[in-house]
Amino acid sequence: MSTPSYARHRFPPAIIQHAVRLYFRFALSYRDVEDLLAERGIDASYETLPDVAALEAASQGVAFAAIGLLLVICLRGVQRATRFPSGLVVIAVTATCVGLLRWPLIPVVLVIAPLSVALAWRRV
């Protein structure tokens, strides 16, 4: 991975990295980071913080990692479910009720979970 360039930014790299570290480590808002930097004598507006390339790159990296993790988990679940046809039926019914019919997840799971357990029990 290449080192980010801070050529177009008004603050030195150490301050930008500190702001990014505060933002991600403590899940702060831009205004909170601005207040913490102001306590250290750094006058930075929260409107300029989203322009920091490191913030954008880090948030995109986290988003791509989350998407990849979600896909891996889904693929593993489908692979396990293909061994048992009743598992595919439960997945299809749940996806249809929640995704297409827009029913709330909790009641759907509360109804489908006992049916899924009964199908799994019958299979054993």
Image (cartoon, rainbow, N blue to C red):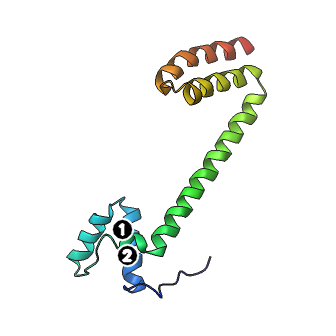
Q: Residue at x 57, y 18 (%)?
A: 112
Q: Measured along the vertical axis of the image, is residue 95 above or below residue 18? A: above
Estimate the x, y position of residue 58 in percent, counting from the top left: 50, 66
Q: Is residue 124 left or right of residue 100?
A: right
Q: Measured along the vertical axis of the image, is residue 79 above or below residue 67? A: above
Q: For mark 1, give the secondary structure.
A: helix
Q: CA distance from mark 1 to mark 2?
A: 6 Å
Q: How many marks?
A: 2
Task: Give neighbour class at mark 2: few <14, some 14-19, many 20+ (Cα, 10 Å).
Answer: few
Q: For mark 2, give the secondary structure.
A: helix
Q: Residue at x 59, y 57 (%)?
A: 64
Q: Measured along the vertical axis of the image, is residue 73 above or below residue 96? A: below
Give the labeled residue for mark 1.
22
Image quadrant containing the N terminus: bottom right
Residue found at the far front of this picture: 101
Disc on res. 18: 2
Under mark 1, the amino acid is Leu
- Residue 124 at least partly seen: no
1 and 2 marks in contact (CB < 8 Å) = yes
Foreground pick, 7 / 118: 7
Q: Residue at x 28, y 74 (%)?
A: 45
Q: Is residue 90 left or right of residue 36?
A: right
